[in-house]
Amino acid sequence: MALQRARSAEEYAEWVKQARFEVQDLRDCLLYDMEEIGEMGRFPAFLDPLAQGIESVYDAMCRGEYSFGREDLPFMEIAEMNADQIPFMVLLKQINETHRKGLDVEE
């Protein structure tokens, strides 16, 4: 199954914004679960690097310094290793696919 790529810069930026929201939502859910069971543990080790990686892409977009590339985004390695714990993994794969192959625009 081929991954969908963003069809416009606006759609791509929205995906990145959505990924930022999803990471924070995952963090909030884990925090709630920890409070519910009365244990204050630690967040999974992948969460901070993932959040920082997505934030880095977002910041580069905001500064007008983002550029597409042929290589995977830096956070994809850790995301792939923890894919079973990331409910929005398809979104991350779509962002990465668009980063690597560019926007899906009609010729």
Image (cartoon, rainbow, N blue to C red):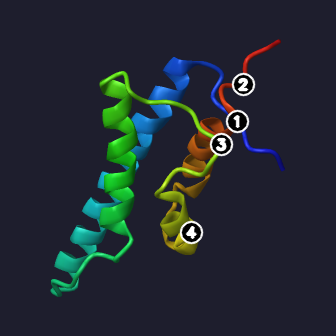
Give the residue type that dot 4 points to: Ala
Tell me the quarter of the image containing the C terminus. Answer: top right
Give the residue type that dot 3 points to: Arg
Q: Position of residue 29 (x, y in %)?
A: 30, 64
Q: Is 80 situated left or right of 28 in this image?
A: right
Query: Could you say which quadrant of the image residue 57 lies in?
Result: top left
Identified at 30% across, 70% down, the residue is: 30
In this rendering, is residue 85 above or below 60?
below
**Nearer the viewer's eye, disc 1 or disc 2?**
1
**Nearer the viewer's eye, disc 3 or disc 1?**
3
Residue under pointer 2: 104
CA gap, disc 2 and disc 3: 15 Å
Residue under pointer 4: 83
Identified at 44% across, 37% down, the residue is: 16
Give the residue type that dot 2 points to: Asp
**Nearer the viewer's eye, disc 4 or disc 1?**
1
Taking the image as drawn, is residue 32 in sight? yes
Helix, strand or loop at label 3? It is: loop
Contact check, label 2 and label 3, Cβ < 8 Å: no
- Of residues 83 and 61, the one nearer the viewer is 61
Identified at 66% across, 30% down, the residue is: 102
**Nearer the viewer's eye, disc 2 or disc 3?**
3
| Dot label at residue 70 | 3
Residue under pointer 1: 101
Of the image marks 2 and 3, the number of the one nearer the N terminus: 3
Helix, strand or loop at label 4? It is: helix
Contact check, label 4 and label 3, Cβ < 8 Å: no
**Nearer the viewer's eye, disc 4 or disc 3?**
3
Of the image marks 4 and 3, the number of the one nearer the N terminus: 3
Taking the image as drawn, is residue 23 in sight? no
In this rendering, is residue 3 above or below 35?
above
CA gap, disc 4 and disc 1: 22 Å
